[in-house]
Image (tube, rainbow, N blue to C red):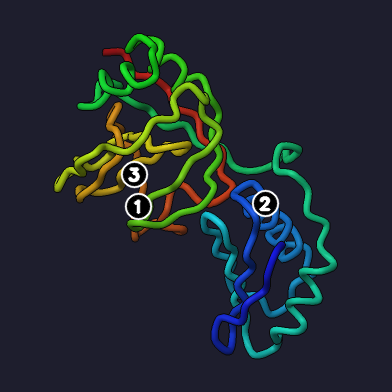
Amino acid sequence: MTRLLAAGHRGLLVECDDLPEVMALHRALEEARAGGALPGVVDLVPAARTVLVTFDETASHSRIAEALAALEVRPRDDDPTGREVQVDVSYGGDDLDEVARLSGLSVEEVVRRHAAATYVVAFTGFAPGFAYLVGGDPALVVPRRDTPRTRVPRGSVALAGEFTGIYPQEGPGGWQLIGRTEAPLWDLDREPPALLAPGTRVRFARLDP
């Protein structure tokens, strides 16, 4: 942890060095809260380089800072726990050929490698239900499109940099589209509404063409 910043009267923002540190810290905080070691904590919100800790009137900035200092933060790779979700995908998105060109792989190899990996939700954002997944094949690290689309279909599976993401509803976006899924990523009638929460493991299953 590099810095602790007050975020209003009931929040503390933890700045981290990188995304792996964010993920390890978030997991340690979730474990501590589940074990009763973080009384007063209301929510934990990871992002690309920060974790926001919000708390109620029974806690304070100083008490939360003390609890953070006492945490044992371990790399996430040693975590055997966590929910796993399978997402069925029909590969063949508009940018699949471009991803193959950028990676120097065949289209079939791009699909094979993408479906072979186990991913972890690092954080969520951009739109309700949109999860940033890490853990994919390094060969599939590709840049965003030069020109974003004004309309990306709901359920589009896409790549950008080190991340895989799934668009939970139609909207604008600049990621490289490689497939589609019918998985219900965001449902207000479900608790919780988001299918993919930070820390969830994700496997993509290829549907027959």
CB atoms of marks 3 and 1 within 8 Å: yes
Q: Position of residue 118 (x, y in %)?
A: 55, 29
Query: Which residue bears the numbered disc 3?
Result: 184
Identified at 34% across, 60% down, the residue is: 188
Identified at 48% across, 21% down, the residue is: 139
Quadrant for residue 107, please give it.
top left
Circle 3 Cα neighbour tier, 10 Å, few/some/many (<14 / 14–19 / ≥20): some
Secondary element type, mark 1: loop
Identified at 85% across, 67% down, the residue is: 70
- Mark 2: amino acid: Glu
Query: Which residue bears the numbered disc 2?
Result: 21
Query: Which residue bears the numbered disc 1?
Result: 186
- Residue lying at the far left in this picture: please name it: 150
Q: Left or right of 83: which side holds 165?
A: left
Identified at 33% across, 57% down, the residue is: 127
| Badge 2 or badge 3: first in the primary sequence | 2
Residue 86, numbered label: none
| Image height of 187 relative to 200, above or below | below
| Badge 1 or badge 2: first in the primary sequence | 2
Circle 1 Cα neighbour tier, 10 Å, few/some/many (<14 / 14–19 / ≥20): some
Q: Position of residue 154 (x, y in %)?
A: 23, 42
Q: Position of residue 13 (x, y in %)?
A: 60, 72
- Mark 3: amino acid: Pro
C-alpha separation, residue under disc 1 versus residue under disc 2: 27 Å
